[in-house]
Image (spheres, rainbow, N blue to C red):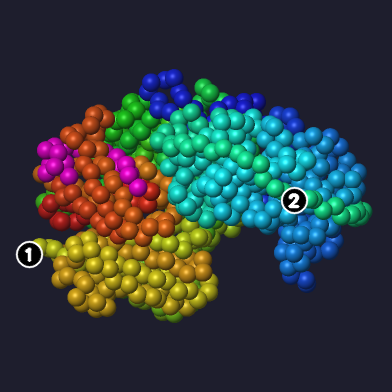
């Protein structure tokens, strides 16, 4: 399938909707092309609204262990032309390609790290003719002279211009990076190790702007050529430099990280792409706030006398191939947050930001992904999906299951459509839900009967996915699946919805903590979320089960899940020989990459009371840092809560993890180092007790607090907790990645309740230091709203250090003096940069069974 380019590609990336019922946010259409792009590389685009993209790529050569240099030409319609530039494998791959309009040539840079030199190719795509020029230093940046198209090359301490078979070279100590393009005045901007910003004209005249003037790394020039932008990671700043005035303005937008893949400034917006964490962080420049401005002045600097050396171009033979692969598309929306939109799409690794222009940008991931802002006034829909909603044996006094759902409209239009998809039918229910409000359905299946006219005969088992469609905005769902007993007490589990579009490119997912014993069984389920614009196909996925005690595979089950449906494997471990115990994990692997979005989870069920803990699978790649918000070994006279912790090495090779528990009561820290062979895991039945055994003086008899895991050498893992009360009821949850979470300043929880039957506790956690300051604090503000969207009482605030936790018990009644259902909580980080986690536990007062709901 081909895609026509959007006519409104030049629209601003941050949309300000005029409809007062719809909040401002950023909406993009993302098209993924199955074309390989190199890590840390940069590309280009031909002129015109439909101009083709040029992408540096490579093919690994097994016999030599080198790379065949390749360049792709991608037409926005989907046509791809591939050129092998050289049949000789090189020690490194192409890192930059620039399109030279004057003679319609693609100029490609290949640095050769082992040889400390570089190659420059010039390709004529019309004929396939190409030349190669050797450069006698390790050039890592390529820019084209705006006047004559001559390549400029930058390496450590070196700047060079290649023209007419001659290489003109300047030695400038300290130079490490060049801005993405020349500015409007024809100057090349250079950053140095010492933080000094330099500007250089095409005749070699050099100017220095003094110490501390450099915007940092990822230097780029805006489309107008008048501003220089960068990331000053050492000071947590996004920086703009204006050469006309010398003004350097720094905004506290980003953390000091090494995983930013690129920075782009175009169409009145600034966008950052990251290899993981906040994949795309976009905002309107005019809305950036809180910046600090200083002024730098320039002074002439000595660039020395350039050296001129011959650099002949040698003809090479290229190999061309053509294809039309099928791209996939989706629309994503991010609510505005302090003037920016944040997209944290699951499972993707952004390796580079290849090109940007007119608010549109191209990134390299598993393929290349083109993000285009929707035109002002264009309509779009976001889809939040719960993996399952059920009504089972409603007339059975002790073996029934019902689903309570809270639907919250954050900033969308008021006409919200709910869809329940079962194996036999699809049912819809339209509701009126103004922006900012919440509605609770105590038995959502019954609501489809009563309000939607669904033909769902009472007494029959009903199970299927539940989707909410929000127009021109977003919202969320929170579910509680429960058993109701004759005395009206309940036990159950809780979970939240997923944005289907954000899950569309996830491949493998993993989870652990599975049990098969006399006391427990584990069910495993998968839901097909259909996150792409294309017609949704059946999801074929394998569930590969492992014994974490031995690291061995114990069996595989396959599921075929039709579009929008849900499938469950009932107690699959019981079908595998010898699979008895409580240290099992499962990895979900679709049979085709990027086929559709999916959700997967396990329910660990007590055979004694049928209470279950919900454990959701998460992407298995890049989970090197994990934080669990709390483990517990504490309680009162009648009830004690104890946390069981499971940790699994998902790397496929031996791994080392540094583990830290922080007591929320005393602030004491207990650390240990775990060495885990490939596929192995640990299970601590009483996790707090485990740390107490390591350091008895540091952990109190009643204690609780968060746990952080840091895997060394980019290894990865999965961690989960199951916390149970003395009577056997309990809850489950999984770890978060603090490096993903730190970009989120605002999170929300749906479904707070306080009445005679239920109470709600809310906790906030500092998820750990991620910057240079190991003791950096954050301040969190909690704002509670009722079902109508009105703020309740005065917002609550708490300042936390790394690893600290604070809980407000009975948050509605005690600090706020309220009761009822349909409440939501907004948690904002109002000071500091480090990540936080937040959650509520909704507790049945009769059974003491808690349900865990995490802020999203």
Q: Could you tell me if residue 661 is visible in this image?
A: yes
Mark drawn on residue 667: none
Side (left or right) of 838 relative to 656: left
Q: Position of residue 435 (x, y in %)?
A: 34, 28
Tell us which disc is closer to us: 2 or 1. 2
Identity of the residue drawn at 56% across and 35% down = 246
The image quadrant of residue 684 is: bottom left
**Percent coordinates x, y for residue 5 in the rendering:** 67, 31
In the rendered image, the vertical position of residue 379 relative to residue 53, given as above or below: above
**Going from the N terminus, do you reach mark 2 or mark 1 first?**
2
Residue occupied by mark 2: 304
Residue extending farthest left: 637
Q: Which residue is mark 1?
A: 637
Q: Is residue 94 left or right of residue 389?
A: right
Quarter of the picture holding the N terminus: top right
Q: Are the residues flagged by discs 2 and 1 in contact, CB closer than 8 Å?
A: no
Q: Is the residue 203 above or below the residue 24 in the image?
A: below
Give the class, few, some or many, for how many residues have Cα within 10 Å of label 1's Cα (few <14, many ≥20): few
Q: Secondary structure at mark 1?
A: loop
Q: Which residues are magenta?
A: 811-832
Residue 398 drawn in magenta: no
Q: Nearer the viewer, residue 578 or 668?
A: 668
Left/right placement of residue 129 relative to residue 531 reads right
Along the line of sight, the residue nearer the viewer: 426 or 327: 327
The Cα–Cα distance between marks 2 and 1, rounded to whole angstroms, is: 80 Å
Q: Quadrant of residue 643?
A: bottom left
Q: Residue at x 38, y 58 (%)?
A: 773
| Residue depicted at 37% across the width and 43% down the height | 745
Q: Position of residue 500 (x, y in %)?
A: 47, 43
Please report the residue visible at 74 percent of the width from the left and 59 percent of the height from the top.
Answer: 138
User: Looking at the picture, how far across and down is residue 357, in whole percent?
Assistant: 64, 34
Queried whether the magenta region covers residue 831, the answer comes back as yes
């Amino acid at each position: 399938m081909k895609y026509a380019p959007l006519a409104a590609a030049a629209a601003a990336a941050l949309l300000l909707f005029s409809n007062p019922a719809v909040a401002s946010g950023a909406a993009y259409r993302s098209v993924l092309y199955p074309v390989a792009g190199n890590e840390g590389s940069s590309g280009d685009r031909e002129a015109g609204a439909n101009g083709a993209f040029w992408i540096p790529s490579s093919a690994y050569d097994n016999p030599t262990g080198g790379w065949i240099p390749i360049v792709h030409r991608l037409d926005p319609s989907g046509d791809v032309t591939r050129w092998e530039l050289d049949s000789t494998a090189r020690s490194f791959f192409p890192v930059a390609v620039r399109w030279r309009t004057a003679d319609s040539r693609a100029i490609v840079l290949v640095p050769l790290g082992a040889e400390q030199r570089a190659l420059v190719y010039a390709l004529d795509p019309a004929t396939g003719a190409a030349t190669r020029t050797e450069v006698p230093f390790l050039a890592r940046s390529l820019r084209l002279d705006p006047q004559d198209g001559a390549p400029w090359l930058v390496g450590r301490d070196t700047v060079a211009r290649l023209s007419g078979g001659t290489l003109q070279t300047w030695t400038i100590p300290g130079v490490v990076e060049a801005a993405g393009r020349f500015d409007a005045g024809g100057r090349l901007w250079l950053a140095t190790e010492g933080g000094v910003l330099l500007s250089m004209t095409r005749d070699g005249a050099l100017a220095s702007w003094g110490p501390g003037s450099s915007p940092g790394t990822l230097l780029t020039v805006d489309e107008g050529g008048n501003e220089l932008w960068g990331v000053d990671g050492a000071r947590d700043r996004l920086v703009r430099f204006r050469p006309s005035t010398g003004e350097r303005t720094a905004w506290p937008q980003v953390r000091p990280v090494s995983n930013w893949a690129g920075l782009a400034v175009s169409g009145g917006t600034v966008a950052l792409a990251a290899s993981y964490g906040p994949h795309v962080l976009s905002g309107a420049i005019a809305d950036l706030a809180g910046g600090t401005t200083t002024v730098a002045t320039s002074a002439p600097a000595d660039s020395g006398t350039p050296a001129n050396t011959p650099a002949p171009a040698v003809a090479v033979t290229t190999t061309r191939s053509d294809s039309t692969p099928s791209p996939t598309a989706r629309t994503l929306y991010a609510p505005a947050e302090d003037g920016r939109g944040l997209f944290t799409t699951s499972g993707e690794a952004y390796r580079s930001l290849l090109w940007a222009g007119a608010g549109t940008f191209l990134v390299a991931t598993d393929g290349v992904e083109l993000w285009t802002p929707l035109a002002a006034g264009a309509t779009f829909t976001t889809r939040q999906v719960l993996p399952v909603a059920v009504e089972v044996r409603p007339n059975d006094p002790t073996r029934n299951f019902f689903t309570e759902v809270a639907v919250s409209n954050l900033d969308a239009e008021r006409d919200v459509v709910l869809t329940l998809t079962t194996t036999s039918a699809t049912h819809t229910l339209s509701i009126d839900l103004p922006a900012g409000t919440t509605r609770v359905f105590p038995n959502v299946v019954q609501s489809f009967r009563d309000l939607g006219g669904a033909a769902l005969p009472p007494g029959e088992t009903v199970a299927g996915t539940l989707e909410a469609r929000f127009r021109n905005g977003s919202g969320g769902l929170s579910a509680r699946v429960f058993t109701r007993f004759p005395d009206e007490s309940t036990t159950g589990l809780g979970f939240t919805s997923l944005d289907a579009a954000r899950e569309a490119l996830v491949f493998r997912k993993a989870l652990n903590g599975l049990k098969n014993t006399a006391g427990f069984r584990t069910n495993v389920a998968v839901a097909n979320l259909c996150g792409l614009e294309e017609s949704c196909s059946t999801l074929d996925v394998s569930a590969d089960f492992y014994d974490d005690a031995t690291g061995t595979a114990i069996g595989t089950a396959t599921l075929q899940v039709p579009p929008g449906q849900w499938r469950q494997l009932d107690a699959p471990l019981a079908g595998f020989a010898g699979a008895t115990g409580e240290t099992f994990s499962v990895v979900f692997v679709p049979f085709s990459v990027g086929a559709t979005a999916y959700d997967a989870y396990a329910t660990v069920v007590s055979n004694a009371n049928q209470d279950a803990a919900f454990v959701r699978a998460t992407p298995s790649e890049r989970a090197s840092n994990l934080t669990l918000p709390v483990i517990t070994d504490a309680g009162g006279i009648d009830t004690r809560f104890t946390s069981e912790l499971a940790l699994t090495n998902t790397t496929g090779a031996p791994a080392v993890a540094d583990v830290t528990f922080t007591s929320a009561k005393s602030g004491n820290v207990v650390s240990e180092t775990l060495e885990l062979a490939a596929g192995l895991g640990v299970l601590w039945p009483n996790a707090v007790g485990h740390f107490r055994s390591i350091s008895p003086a540091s952990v109190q008899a009643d204690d609780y607090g968060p746990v952080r895991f840091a895997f060394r050498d980019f290894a990865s893992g999965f961690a989960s907790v199951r916390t149970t009360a003395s009577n056997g009821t309990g809850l489950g949850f999984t770890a978060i990645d603090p490096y993903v979470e730190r970009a989120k300043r605002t999170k929300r929880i749906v479904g707070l309740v306080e009445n005679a039957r239920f109470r709600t506790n809310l906790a906030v956690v500092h998820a750990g230091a991620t910057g240079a300051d190991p003791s950096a604090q954050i301040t969190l503000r909690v704002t509670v709203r009722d079902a109508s969207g009105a703020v309740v009482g005065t917002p609550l605030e708490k300042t936390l250090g790394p690893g600290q936790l604070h809980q407000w018990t009975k948050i509605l009644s005690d600090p706020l003096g309220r009761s009822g259902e349909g409440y939501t909580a907004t948690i904002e980080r109002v000071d500091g940069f480090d990540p936080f986690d937040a959650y509520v536990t909704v507790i049945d007062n009769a059974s003491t069974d808690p349900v865990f709901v995490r802020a999203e």
